[in-house]
Image (cartoon, helix red, strand yellow):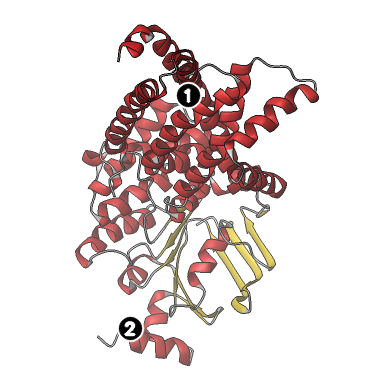
Amino acid sequence: MDIVLENFDRFVQGLTTTLSLTALSWVGAFVIGVAVASLRVGPIPPLRGAGAVYVEVVRNCPLTVLFVVFYFGFPSIGIILPKFASAVIILSVYTGAFVAETVRAGFNTVARGQVEAARTLGLSFAQMLGMVVLPQALRAVVGPLGSLLSALIRNSSIAFSISVIELTGTTFQIATETAEFIPVFVAAAVAYLLLTLPTGLVVGVIERRVAIKR
Amino acid sequence: MTGTPVVVLDKVNKWFDQLHVLRDIDLSVDAGEVVVVIGPSGSGKSTLCRCINRLEAIDSGTIHLDGVPLPDEGKELARVRAQVGMVFQSFNLFAHKSVLANVTLGPVKAKGVPKAAARERAMALLERVGIADKAERYPAELSGGQQQRAAIARALAMEPTLMLFDEPTSALDPEMIAEVLDVMIGLASEGTTMIVVTHEMGFARSAAQRVVFMDDGRIVETASPDRFFSAPETDRARDFLSKILAH
């Protein structure tokens, strides 16, 4: 316990990094996911296909492998990015594939008749999607999106594999310095739970708030 | 009556795979005319209705709206659709929007009507269909009849040159059918051009200038309501009427 208290500031620092890593990656994943899901139901076949390929490739690869491939791959195609930025991009791209599938499932909850009604009003495909389908689809999948956010918080620990010193990285450093693995990692587990458990509660509240009466 | 055709169908054919659902359909509807399409289920009457605003694409023949051929999917089609109001059997109101927002969405987004003006007109329309007090409610909070009247207001808000009704009362309880038909009879008497697919023979008698009877994808008979109901010319029309009027 003393070891944890002595290194409290470093834990907070690591936690802060995990939080910003998660928050930025979630924004990226959400944008990618909504865009890809929209392309997959859109009127342009090549984009539908591209969306499908992206989703299937990314979500069927282990995240650690993606980290290594992208992080060491970026410089070889002339892109040199800070570790943190690389981690945000990789986590965004990875989680984005799951968000895309979840949003697509949400599309299926919107009655086909409402799409027809939007079309008969003369709305464009983008307007129909943005004003009729997406608002309802997203409300329907708040719960599953919350699970993805929780998974992202935990998955952000893999950024440690490219030496981003977030919560897991910090924990590992402290553990190796002190040789006290168990208390230090138990503290890390508690810290992760402090992020994930409230996330679940907040998501539950949002889910009930935005639910559409049927 | 001006006599200008609002919609003209010429030799329209449509298949669903092997099923020939529309066979050589010729139909012309003049401005201000109310045409009721009746026929047994599976006769193609709903499909006919849905082809006119290209919710279903036709396989051969032509459809002209206000003298212009129906365009392929795209911006131009969206513009044409904005001129054709449609009322569905299942209402299809946007579940996440208030009744008022349902009615203003089309004018604001598809036609660029300023919000305040769209709102004012929407309230007038809701008043006209008798549900102004429900403007801020959500579709699920309304009865079926109220939802359908909201859907009619939504379609009217686009100031369409033609209104299509695809079995507008078929999903309603009997006591709610009357409130929707009243609104439709009001529209008909004001000179709205309407194509109405329905089983409501009373509406056909009181509001239609013409009854089109369909069977097996064909228009079998076209006549004034009086003539059609009192002296149908074809055996199939007689057979159909005997079945629905027997009770």
Name the front one of labels 1 and 2: 1
Q: Which mark is residue B64?
A: none
Crowding around mark 1 (Cα neighbors within 10 Å: few <14, some 14 to 19, many 20+) is many
Query: What residue type is disc 2 on?
Result: Ile
Residue occupying image coordinates x 61% and y 25%: A89
Q: Is residue A151 visible?
A: yes
- Looking at the image, the residue that sits furthest to the right is A77
Query: What residue type is disc 1 on?
Result: Thr
Residue B47: image location, x then y, percent: 53, 68
From the image, which quarter does the C terminus of chain B lie in? bottom left
- Looking at the image, the residue that sits furthest to the front is A179
Residue A129: image location, x then y, percent: 52, 41
Relative vertical location of residue B217 with respect to residue A60 in this rendering, above or below: below
Count every numbered label the image shows and give the total: 2
Which chain does tag 1 point to? A
Q: Is residue B129 visible?
A: no
Residue annotated with mark 1 = A22
Relative vertical location of residue A213 with respect to residue A185 in this rendering, above or below: below
Relative vertical location of residue B148 with respect to residue A136 in this rendering, above or below: below
Seen from the viewer's position, the closer of residues A147 and A100 is A147
Residue A136: image location, x then y, percent: 40, 42
| Distance CA(mark 1)–CA(mark 2) | 65 Å
Residue annotated with mark 2 = B244
Residue occupying image coordinates x 24% and y 44%: B131
